[in-house]
Amino acid sequence: MGEGLIRFYHTKIKREWKMAFAVAFFCGLLIHIYKFTNTLPGHDSLFNVYSSQNMAKSGRWFLAIACGFSSYFDLPWIDGLFSLFWIAVTAVLIVDLFRMENPVLIFLTGGFLASFPAVTQTFYFEFTADGYMMAMALAALGVRCSVIGEGRKSRLFLAFVSIVLCCGIYQAYLSFALVLALCYFMTELLENRRTAKEYLHWARNQILLYGFAMAAYYVIWKLAMLVQGIQPAPYLGVAAVGRITLGTLLNAAREMVRAFASVFAVWNFMEKGLTVYTVLNMLFLLLCVGTLITAMVKSRLFCRRLQCGLFLLSAVAIPFAALIWLFASPGVQYTTRMEQSVCLLYILTAFLLERWVKPAYSSLAALFLSVIILHNGITANLFYQYVHRCYERSYAIGVEIATRIHLLDQGDITSVMVVGKTDWFDREEYESASGLRELGLLKEVHRDLFSAGNTYSTLFLSEIVGLELSYYVEHPEEEIPPVDFSSQPQWPVPDSWEWRFPVADLETYQRLIESAQVKEMGSWPAADAVQVVDHVAVVKLSEVD
């Protein structure tokens, strides 16, 4: 039994594919195992202990299916392994696309895919990471199936479906497909194995492919919302997609320059000072530009006007492709987890070094690129350490709040009300503190989960600390009704999400917050920051304007 599978593995799977898969998988495991084997919940994790991931209102109509393979529970180890599988598949597709054979180049490819900060921040939201990594693999598959000279309709149709599903999981990975296609095109232009007509024919087909794919994605999204009877979410500009003017395009172009530059230098280093992250990336940019110029000179690309123009146009288009959704909606905000496509610049540079630069120099450059991968891995673990400390601080606060409520509880407390939130990081202190600045792109770390608003505070008390009121323990026949989020002074949550916890209703909240007793309460951690007012346990974390 299984002999056929073993024979297929040995005879049909190329050595380079096996190497790429193993490198990406185990490199990712070494870097991220701390996250996979610890409970490090972020603020969104509180809503996703179990979630169907039905995010059709945000345009992610295929996310529920993509995340279904690993169950809809937040399982760090399982979600992590599935994520690494898809990262490894992506590495295999990229190695095959560029026909890589050098083991060092394959190592760098897998290393950058697994270590890039975008992946690390995605693992902060690990309950959905496996789906997002599948989107990345689908993006790579779409490019691999639409290479120059590919005339098989089945392959082109597979490329079309892959791009549509990729966007249906997470729209940001359209950028991964676009940047990968541009990088591939640039290498083909340097090699000069095709005619000018073939290059133009491929470029035209790519425009048609992505145009039809986006149209199909949009139609399916609208149908999914129509069937479910929902409207687009206001989250990060999703509801404003398509509302474009000349002014919004110009603003998007300016934001694109700023956002793309900040990937390599998070702070204004002339004002805030240099970090290891900034120095490494400034050196990388010099290496990247130098490698591109060397490849153009040695390939005599300057002698071929059309190919040279296409090459330069592709290079200039990369930042626009990496941040393309800035041009789709004036409200779109790019976060680190949306910038995985930028890691392809590092892979492209490594590939061109191996092909066009003398072995002695390319070997030194490979060592330098390996240092960047090592630094990415160290930064990932530094980030996870901060997240762990935030969780421990949150848990300590939660347990103390629950203890104070229990000490005051005489069996008559029927609901809980949280006022305000704990302090956020001071931005100036945050940017000047050397430890935090070394996080690079992973700079958004919460001090604790009580700093994100009422919903998260009460969720943490309920789901993590396990706070129970003795009134409901002694009256088991009195069922706690689901929280009506539409009437709560809290952050919005998914429509289908039902949570039962005795939270004070909006009328009670507004009445008590204006009362003299609540106004005179001290803010956390003052001794009077937790009091019982009209059978409500009031927790005052801060003053409210």
Image (cartoon, rainbow, N blue to C red):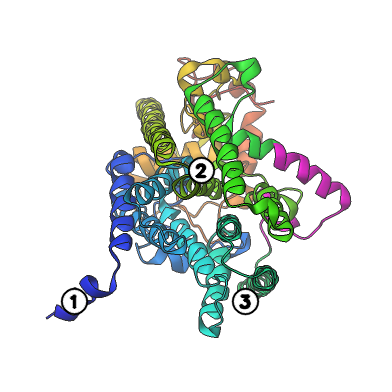
Q: Is residue 247 above or below residue 305?
A: above
Taking depth in this image into account, of 335 and 401 the one nearest to the observer is 335
Residue with the mark numbered 3 = 227
**Which kind of residue does numbered mark 2 sit on?**
Val
Q: Mark 1 or mark 2: which comes first in sequence?
A: 1
Kindly state the secondary structure of the residue where label 2 is placed.
loop
Q: How many marks?
A: 3
Q: Nearer the viewer, mark 1 or mark 2?
A: 1
Q: Mark 1 or mark 3: which comes first in sequence?
A: 1
Q: CA distance from mark 1 to mark 3?
A: 46 Å
Residue with the mark numbered 1 = 7
Q: Mark 2 or mark 3: which comes first in sequence?
A: 3
Residue with the mark numbered 2 = 503
Other residues around mark 2 within 10 Å, as few (<14) / some (14–19) / many (≥20): many
**Picture residue at 64% right of the left edge, 40% below the top:** 260
Q: Nearer the viewer, mark 2 or mark 3?
A: 3
**Which kind of residue does numbered mark 3 sit on?**
Val
The magenta segment is 232-257
- Residue 443: x %, y % from top left: 52, 30
Q: Is residue 162 above or below residue 237?
A: below
Label pair 2/3, CB-CB below 8 angstroms: no
